[in-house]
Amino acid sequence: MSDPVGDNKKLKGCEFSRWATQPALIFTLIFFVTPLAIMVVISFWQRVSGKLVATWSGANYIKFFGTDYLLESLINSIEVTLATTVISVLLAYPLAYILAFRISPKWQKIILIFAVLPFWTAYVVRSYSWLLVISENGIINYVLTSLGIVDQPLEMAYTRGATILGFVHFFTMLLTLTIYANLVQIKPSYQKAAEDLGASKLQVFLRITLPLSIPGVAVGAFITFVIAIGDYITPQILGGGTEVLVPQAIMLQVSRAANFPMASVMSITLMLVIVVVYVITAKHLKMDRV
Amino acid sequence: MHRLRNIPSYVYLVLALSFIYLPVVVLVLFSFQDGVLPVFPFTGPSLQWYEKMLANDRLVESLGNSIMVALLSSLVTTVLGFLAAYGMARRKPRFAGGVRFVLMAPLTVSYLIIGMGLLITLNMIGIPKSLFAVGLGHVVINLPLCFAIIYSQFGDHLRNIDWAARDLGASDGQTLFRVIAPIMKPSLLASFCLSATLSWDEFIIAFLLSRFDVTLPVIIFEMLRAGLTPEVNAAGTMVFAISMLTIGITAICMFIAFRGKK
């Protein structure tokens, strides 16, 4: 430390390493933070005969929450996203549980990788692939009609159910990953101790394994919620025109009307919903750790 | 006894995997269809839809655009992420928590909202819709991931190596690019490949920020308006195959990175 040359070099290093963080930070500030701030400002502007007028008025927000079909898109989005999250957790939990506790360690990783590979099918194509399965002349209807189970093809595509199906397929893979990662971290000694003390299999699961795995469920469910509620493609391709979700409403405002203030209002509303969900999830996480 | 008890588990496992693989199998199978509809009965195999796809000028052009955007945006992302991770690990800057919060924040915002914000902002500064704008958007969404991957691989041993290099007289640039970067190569490659895969597959930002030159997902989305056609199956299968390839390389890099750390 007393060596002046060494000190000098360390000092130089410090200055440089401080500089090293700047490009990424400045980039994020310019192309992420600033755009969000601009959206907040613009959401209070008015659009008068095709031109933006700088005002501070809550008229857009009042219009959003006062117009039936706009408010409905928000309610639709929340319903679809909640259904998606719940169904995905219910499907993924047993899968993750089986992988973690019923499969030999040698096979666990291989089956897990195999189970999440389709995660990387092209985003746009994933929804389209489900159309091949559920559309009027798709696989399921082909099988059902040729077996004579139904006379008329079932109408499964272009419904809310189809949107949820597309979402559930994607997020089951994601949730299996987060829940599995959590389950394998639980020390087997906890479960053994409970068994030794006379707990039944069900009691061990309900009072040891399940509570300890809640963080993995919460993390996965939060990611699911955030991605699903902001997704445009899945409801657009699989849901068709039957009902509009918020991302579709935003895209309509942008592409048809070029109404950026209204699109900003909806985007900010979406972000507020996500913040609320984050607060709820974070609270649950803490409560379960205590 | 043990085996019998596990039968319901295996049944569930098989059912779940079938559900996960059903659309993928259907997609790939009917890309080799010999008719005009990608549904039963299967009449192939035939490569006619791959030929048709490769004869589609707009699709091939968008394929080139996608690769270019993916490679360039990932290069920028990895360099920015590497420098930031180095800066944070080498010596914690003031407000380290705040800096990390800002760098990671884009992860919690929907791509749609990030794209919308960029659309409005670039409109204001006067940067037109273009592949360049798409690339900027992809750097925004991938930077947090790349930063996190590279930062997680910076251990204390690197700080000592960094000091050692300086004591031996290496300049900042020499230390960074001839000592630290080579050691970090696996995680740099992993973050580059992951970022390239995500950019390659990204739709909504590319859709919002491009106009005349578009990327492959945007073209595929346009093709969907024509309804079900094996040509989309062929394009989708190709995209999937390329993603698999990049993910494979990423996985190998990560494997080497983590083994190197141990």
Image (spheres, rainbow, N blue to C red):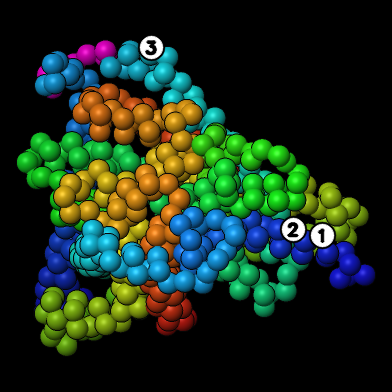
Residue drawn 52% across and 69% down? B44
Q: Nearer the viewer, residue B187 or A251?
A: A251
Provide the chain ID for the residue under circle 1. Answer: B
Q: Quick check: B36 left or right of B77?
A: right
Q: CA distance from mark 3 to mark 2?
A: 46 Å
Quarter residue A114 falls in: bottom right
Q: Which residue is mark 3?
A: A66
Whether residue B23 is in magenta: the answer is: no
Give the magenta range.
Answer: A52-59
Task: Please say whether residue A53 is visible from this viewpoint.
Answer: yes
Q: Nearer the viewer, residue B184 or A36?
A: A36
Q: Amino acid at mark 1?
A: Pro
Whether residue A54 is in magenta: the answer is: yes
Q: Which residue is mark 2?
A: B12
Residue drawn 69% across and 46% down? A145
Residue drawn 26% across and 82% down? B182
Q: CA distance from mark 2 to mark 1?
A: 6 Å
Extreme-left residue of the structure: B126
- Dot 3 crowding, Cα within 10 Å, few <14, some 14–19, many 20+: few
Q: Are marks 2 and 1 in contact (CB under 8 Å)?
A: yes
Extreme-bottom residue of the structure: B168
Q: Nearer the viewer, residue A29 or A193?
A: A29
Marker disc for residue A267? none
Q: Amino acid at mark 2?
A: Tyr
Secondary element at tag 1: helix
- Dot 1 crowding, Cα within 10 Å, few <14, some 14–19, many 20+: few
